[in-house]
Amino acid sequence: MTAAIDMGTGATGDRSTLDLEELLATRLLVQGNSGSGKSHLLRRLLEQSAGWVQQVIVDPEGDFVTLADRYGHVVIEGERSEAELLGIAARVRQHRVSCVLSLEGLDVEDQMRAAGIFLNGLFDAERDFWYPVLVVVDEAQMFAPAAGGEVADEVRKLSLGAMTNLMCRGRKRGLAGVIATQRLAKLAKNVAAEASNFLMGRTFLDIDMARAADLLGLDRRQAEMFRDLPRGAFVALGPALTKRPVKVQIGAVETSARSSSPKLMPLPEATADAADLILTPDPAEFARPIPRYVAPAPRPATDILAELSRPRGEEPPPAAESRPRRPDMTPEEREEQVASALAEVTDAASAFRTDAELYQDFLVRCRIRRLVGQPLSLSDFRHRLAVVRSGADEETMAGEAWGRALSLGGSVADDLKAVFLMLANAAIAGLPCPGDAAIARSYGTHSVRRARRLLGYFEEQGLIVTHQDRAGKRIVAFPDLGCETLPGDPEAAEPESRDAAE
């Protein structure tokens, strides 16, 4: 099925269309200075494709929330916890609901954190829910900066990694990225380079004009045309748009943003002396209390879902103050409860579940235990999960070699850390090298070929050295740890879990 989206008129007056099915496979980059009409272009695209494909909009200024009234988009406020954003993102993909992530009112660092977590939640959805989604990110240079700014390095890496996953690896998961930026020079190159369709609007800086001309295959002399483009006009190129650069005037939209460009208004006629009008106080001002607005805290998503699922007429549950509270726990007791909850979610069947799903299960078990205080973050949970899946016992983890192994594991991606630590545990404890089936299970896959590729990747990074003994069994050595595994059969069947044996 193909869908031709009407974007406006071309240079010759004919209709300019966009192939939506091709866009889902090739992604889109929109560039233009402030006031060039980028938001208008995005709104036109969203309105014309609303009936064809699910849409997710990352909206830093709250301009696209008006789509909810006409097209039924769900507005999600960005001021939520990490667990809430991950859960909402998973359900958005499961139920194929179009939504707008409104980040209005948050500072830049909180906007980047919320957008990164939400995009990662969309990316980590289960394979059964990889339906096509048009993911529109306005002001993309904020979420994928070309250089570090004043925000924390951890937040920048989170947001940049999510945008890179969206544009580089999102296609196979059904995610089609549409990113808009004011300046190409401020946008990370590895994010911009993955787009195959371009709509370039008005810009004035030489470096931005040069990059726009390079992306469109124009020479430097033709780059001057970007200064003369009127508002709402863009130069289009790409497999979903046109094979050669064509000027397009974006058509009208049916909805409008809450904010608009300033218009000239005549000043009111002066009816009194202006100085007396603004400097003479009103006597009532001294008796009137100064209003101080305190924004209400957002309701947790769990409370809203519980209220919706309660039968009509049923009494609400007692307030939090009336419920019995668990006595304060010592740090040791709290750690014991966290370890117990972690052990419950890492059973034999958990290897092929996503980290986001396991994290949600873990948070539920923490609430059942009434653990107060800040829960483990997703990154800390992934680290603890990798340690548990490594199979290391308390004696091994108490040694100095294990500490060095954890330091080496810090340079490994989160999804590979469990495999690396499992191999390191076998080397430190003097155990046979795990077989391909065991390595694949630790990675969360049934493919033994992928397990062998993981070993090759670790060896390319200089973390391990693999060799064979005379019987052809595999040995994995760790140069930085000064130890190696015992010979192990790569074709060995995966040992049964302890739970299954019992």
Image (cartoon, helix red, strand yellow):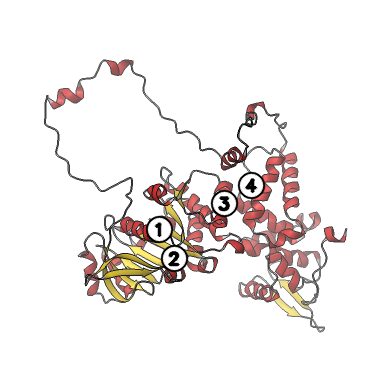
Label 2: few (<14), some (14–19) or many (≥20) C-alpha neighbours in 10 Å: many
Q: CA distance from mark 4 to mark 2?
A: 30 Å
**Camera-nearest residue between 264 and 495:** 264
Mark earlier in primary sequence (2, 1): 1
The amino acid on which the numbered mark 4 sits, given as a three-letter code, is Leu
Q: Amino acid at mark 1?
A: Ala
Q: Which residue is mark 3?
A: 86
- Residue 288: where, in percent of width, then height? 34, 18
Specify few, some or many for label 4: CA neighbours under 10 Å numbering under 14, 14-19, or 20 or more: some
The residue nearer to you, when weighing 71 against 297, is 71
Horizontal side of 35 relative to 393 (left or right) equals: left
- Is tag 4's residue or tag 2's residue first in the polypeptide sequence? 2
Residue matched to label 2: 191
Residue highlighted by disc 1: 140
Instruction: Report whether residue 312 is seen.
Output: yes
Q: Position of residue 2 (x, y in %)?
A: 43, 71
Instruction: State how far apart marks 2 and 3 are (Cα).
Output: 23 Å
Q: Under tag 3, what secondary structure?
A: helix
User: As drawn, is 208 to the left or to the right of 354?
Assistant: left
* Mark identifier at residue 277: none
Q: Secondary structure at mark 1?
A: helix
Q: Residue furthest right?
A: 502
Query: Which residue matches tag 4?
Result: 376
Q: Point out the image quarter for the C terminus.
A: bottom right
Amino acid residing under circle 2: Val
Q: Decide: marks 2, 3 in contact (CB < 8 A)?
A: no
Tag nearer the camera, 4 or 3 = 3
